Image: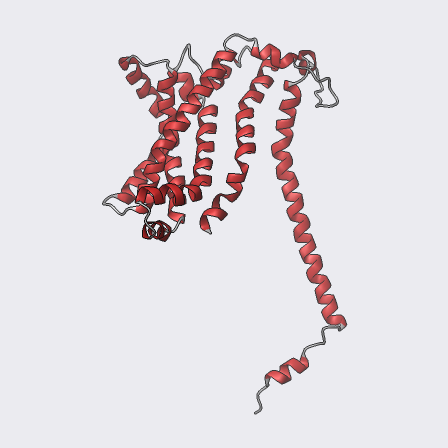
Amino acid sequence: MSSATPDDAAATLPPLDSPEVAEMHRRMRRRAGRGRAFTYVAAVMIAAWILVPIYFVFSMAFTTQETVRSYPKNVLPFIPFSADTMQFFLESEGVLRGLWNSVVVAVITLVLSTLISVPAGYAIARYLFRGRDLFRLSVLAVRAFPIVVLSIPLAVLFLRAGVFDSVYSLALMHTALALPTSILVISSVFASVPYELEEAGQVFGATPLQSFRHIIVPLVLPGIAASGLFTFVLSWNEVFAAAVLTIDNRTLPALLLTSLANAPDAFQFAGSFFLMVPSIVFMFFIRRYLFNMWGQVSK
C-alpha cells in the first residue's frame, strides 16, 4: 500500500491560471463584495436612523413658528430659515436661568466625578487589598437602584439640611449617579497600561508621582476624556432627580418636562435642540480621544 507524497498532492492541484482557479477567485470576490455592500447599507441605515431625527429637530428649531405649526411638515432647505422659533424659546420665562443651571450642575458633576473616579480607578487597577472585588460590586450596585429610590430620601435629607432646591445639592446627586460607571471605566483604562512603564520611569530616577503624571496620565487621558463626556451628558440630560430636588432652580430638562403639557410645538422643538447641542459639541471636540481610547492605551 503506497502513501501519497507532497509532490503527488501538488501534482493533482490545478494550475493557477486554470479556469477552476479563476472561477473560485470570482466567487470569493463576489462574496467579499456582497459582505462589503451589506456593511455599507447597514452603516447608512444606522446613520440615517440617528441623523434624520436630529436634522428634523434642527429644521424645526430654525424656522418660523407658523411653519412649525403647519402640516405636513418639511425640512430645510424646503422651509424658510429663521431664528424666530429659537428667539421665542429663549425669551420664554425661566429658560435662560434653566440653561445656566444645567451648565453649572453639569460642570460641577464633571469636576467632582473626575476628581473622585481617577484616584479610585487607579487604586482598583493597581493595588490588591482585602475586599477589592466586593468594593467593585458595591460601586456598580449603586446603579441598580432606581433614581426614585435615591431621589426621595435625598429630598428629605436636603430639606432637613437646608440645601433643598439648590444646584449644588443636585450636582451631588448627579455625581453619585455618574461615579459607578466613571470609576469602572477609568479603572479598566488604568489596568490596560502595563505597570512596567511606571517601574521603568522610577528606574530612571522619577518619583512615583512623576511616573504617574508624565507616563501614565498621557496614556489614560482618552479614557478620562470619555468618562468626562459620559458624566457631562448624563448630568445634562438627567430629568427625574432634577424635577424632584428642585422647584425654583430647575435645570433645563426639568423645566421642559414640567412645561410640556401646555407648551406649543415651537417651544418643544427648540428645547429638544438645546438638549442635543452639548452632546454633539462635546462629541465633536473629543472625538479624537474617543477614536484613540482603546488603541492608544493597549499599545
At 45% across and 16% down in the image, what residue appears? Answer: 101
Q: Is residue 6 above or below residue 286?
A: below
At 72% across and 76% down in the image, what residue appears? Answer: 15
Which image quarter: residue 148? top left
Which residue is farthest right?
Answer: 19
Which residue is farthest front?
Answer: 205
Return the x and y of residue 256 as percentages of the image width and height: 51, 16
Q: Quadrant of the N terminus?
A: bottom right
Q: Is residue 15 above or below residue 233?
A: below
> Taking 243 as reference, is 289 left or right?
right
Which residue is farthest bottom?
Answer: 1
At 54% across and 32% down in the image, what residue appears? Answer: 285
Q: Is residue 237 above or below residue 15?
A: above
Between residue 260 and residue 218, name the one nearer to us: 218
Which image quarter: residue 85? top right
Whether residue 146 is visible to the viewer of this picture, yes or no, is no
> Taking 101 as reference, is 59 left or right?
right
Q: How is the image coloured?
A: secondary structure
> Taking 112 as reference, is 222 left or right?
right
Return the x and y of residue 44 as percentages of the image width and height: 66, 40
Q: How many marks?
A: 0
Q: Is residue 20 above or below residue 116?
A: below
Which image quarter: residue 287? top right
Return the x and y of residue 19 as percentages of the image width and height: 76, 71
Return the x and y of residue 273 as percentages of the image width and height: 58, 22
Whether residue 44 is visible to the viewer of this picture, yes or no, is yes
